[in-house]
Amino acid sequence: MNKYTRSMLVPVAMVAASLFLSSCATYGMKTASMRNSLLSGDIARAREFIETMPANDDALLDLNKGMLRRMSGDYQASNRVFEQAKRRIDDLYGLSVSEQLAAITVNDTLRAFQGDRFEQTLLHAYMAMNYIQLNALDAARVEMLQADVKMHEWGDEPEEDAFVRYLSGIIYEMLGEQDQALVSYRQAYEIYRSSPERNGIETPDIVKQDLLRLLASQRLWDEYRRLQNDFAMANYTPYKIGGGFGEVIVVFDEGLAPQREENAIQTFSDEISKMVRIALPVYRQPTPILPRVRVNVSGQQYELETVENIDALARHALEADMPIITTRALARAVVKFKTQSEIQDKHGGLAGLLMTVTNMATERADTRSWTTLPQEIRLARLVLPEGQQQINIEMVNAAGRVIDAITQTVMVRSGKRTLISQHWVAPMPVVTATNK
């Protein structure tokens, strides 16, 4: 290597490192503006940011666009982009060899984003709730059937989502399909009961009550009495709607799902008998949730109950994936070390330096996730007199003070069920909406 070539390697290495660091920024870095806008309660600004991001073939961009459009009340536009995300995810079930190779030789971010299983099932749930807002209950039913197919495609470990099963039951009830609703409530109860660690919550009382209510409506008294005893709900009385009363189902999304961050560590590789640097995704401490969320209707208060802990689902999914993520990272470090050593032997120390800088810059953890999902989902079911009702969703802090409120006007119809949904991230001016 001549003197001129050697003198050029250092600035080239610096430029290369700069370019790589820019192009390999973590997902959290790239979307910080969007997330900060949401955390300050500015949904419009967050949506503007995501809508102006360059279009690509990434399902994750579509998922975030869809959620922000939904938060803005643009349900039809939300489902258009959700549908596109769904097609892209379905197309990824057979990842290409080239993508797998890139994940081994460069980093995991070069694999197409497919999302965790809970994210895939929640996509169907949010599309279904969008359809409900658009008065398209049959389309909502189709989404639940598709979610059912997807959960069963996962084989021996289906990882069924309890909230999705519960939402299916609600939609079947709205359609008047009581038998199917009962099946869904049974499934939801079993998932909550059998997987409290993964779900991050115990079985919600509201799910137990709805299961008992449907059993009573089907006159399945043996099962009703057995579960009533198991639930310690001897005083529960099933309700019915009709006779001048309807039901309002309030679905409340709180906060934002956790953001994956990058954690670089030094670990020992048996293959090359050296310490190597690898980058792994990690979740930091969860954000505190609101102590209470309640609905106030004409002075009557109803507590909302947590039915989905997305923070817990995300952490459980990452923990389950960590062994294979770590294995890929170690294999990648070995490949990079061997490549670096070969270049250094052939072209000298400065060439090896360039490769070292490049390897360090490109070693990035995959921190992508559907971060516009809420941290948790709460729900309440209200039996109210027919006519126009003002629903006040109140966010209550630890001191018992209402720190924010969302007001929505709903037309209650006798014998009918109406579902409303809101997403709250941070205190903001009171939002007023109308559901006619």
Image (spheres, rainbow, N blue to C red):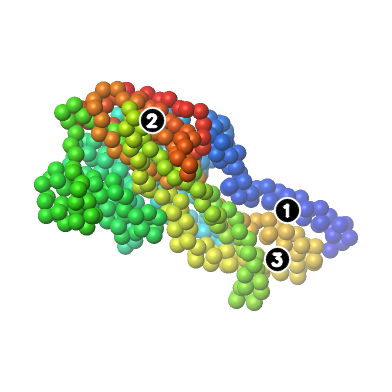
First of labels 1, 3 by sequence position:
1
Q: Amino acid at mark 2?
A: Asn
Where's residue 142, x and y in %? 28, 40
Q: Amino acid at mark 3?
A: Gln
Look at the image and tell me in which quarter the N terminus lies. bottom right
Where's residue 369, x and y in %? 50, 49
Q: At 35% across and 47% down in the image, what residue appears? A: 307
The picture quadrant where one finds residue 143 is top left
Q: Count neighbours of disc 1 (C-alpha within 10 A) and say few if under 14, some if 14 to 19, many if 20 or more.
A: many
Q: Is residue 383 visible?
A: yes
Look at the image and tell me in which quarter the C terminus lies. top left
CA gap, disc 1 and disc 3 = 15 Å
Q: Is residue 80 visible?
A: no
- Disc 3 is placed on an element classified as helix
* Pointer 3 residue: 340
Q: Is residue 88 above or below residue 176?
A: below
Q: At 35% across and 45% down in the image, what residue appears? A: 305
Q: At 23% across and 30% down in the image, what residue appears? A: 246
- Disc 1 is placed on an element classified as helix
* Pointer 1 residue: 17
* Pointer 2 residue: 392
Q: Count neighbours of disc 2 (C-alpha within 10 A) and say few if under 14, some if 14 to 19, many if 20 or more.
A: some
Q: Are marks 3 and 2 in contact (CB under 8 Å)?
A: no
Q: Of the residues tagged 3 and 2, which is closer to the observer?
A: 2
The picture quadrant where one finds residue 394 is top left
| Numbered circle sitting on residue 185 | none
Q: Count neighbours of disc 3 (C-alpha within 10 A) and say few if under 14, some if 14 to 19, many if 20 or more.
A: many
